[in-house]
Amino acid sequence: MLTLGAMLLILVVLAAFLVGLHGGPHASIVSAAVALVVAGVLLAVVLVRAASTGSLDLVAGAITAGAVVATASLLIFGLRSLGAARSVASRPIREQLWTRTGVALTDLAPMGAVRIAGETWSAEAAGGDAIKAGTEVVVVEVDGLHLKVSPDPLRQESH
């Protein structure tokens, strides 16, 4: 019976792995945590049975221990992927917004709002000089989701 339970656990771990591949790091963490709890309970049952009867179902024990190790690895992979995803996600924002032009929606004295790439962003006037609403601006620095902007020199010369 325990061997059948251990083999069923392999299917649970495999399903958790597939959900993690499809759903990304959050799905890996949740599915691995659930599978790890199930594997831990089954391993405890195998060990208690072995201690009480003096014999260990080696197949069930080996399969269950392997499932626990595989699931713990999946959980660690999910956590590492989540950390990597967070650091990678902020990089494209910097690359996409740096040097982009837009317009100041409010006076930036020095804080306010700008519209860049069709979206409203919190912004600060670089250099501390106030920027009037309606002024065309260029992004000179990206700090997380906060932008530092200056008046667009190309637009200022044409006025």
Image (cartoon, rainbow, N blue to C red):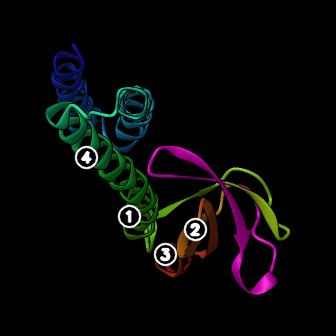
Residue wearing tag 3: 158
Residue wearing tag 2: 137
Query: Who is closer to the viewer here, 99 or 34?
Result: 34
Q: Are marks 2 and 3 in contact (CB under 8 Å)?
A: no
Q: Which circle's residue, 1 or 3, is located before the other in the chain?
A: 1
Q: Residue 129, image x and y in percent?
A: 80, 81
What residue is at 21 percent from the left and 39 percent from the top? Answer: 21
Residue wearing tag 1: 88
What residue is at 76 percent from the left and 52 percent from the top? Answer: 106
Q: Is residue 47 above or below residue 77?
A: above
Q: Which circle's residue, 3 or 4, is located before the other in the chain?
A: 4
Q: Which residues are magenta?
A: 114-133
Disc 2 from disc 4: Cα separation? 52 Å
Q: Which circle's residue, 2 or 3, is located before the other in the chain?
A: 2
Q: Is residue 42 above or below residue 28?
A: above
Disc 1 from disc 3: Cα separation? 38 Å
How many other residues sit within 10 Å of disc 2, few (<14), some (14-19) or many (≥20)? many
Q: Are marks 4 and 1 in contact (CB under 8 Å)?
A: no
The nearer-to-camera label among 1 and 3 is: 1
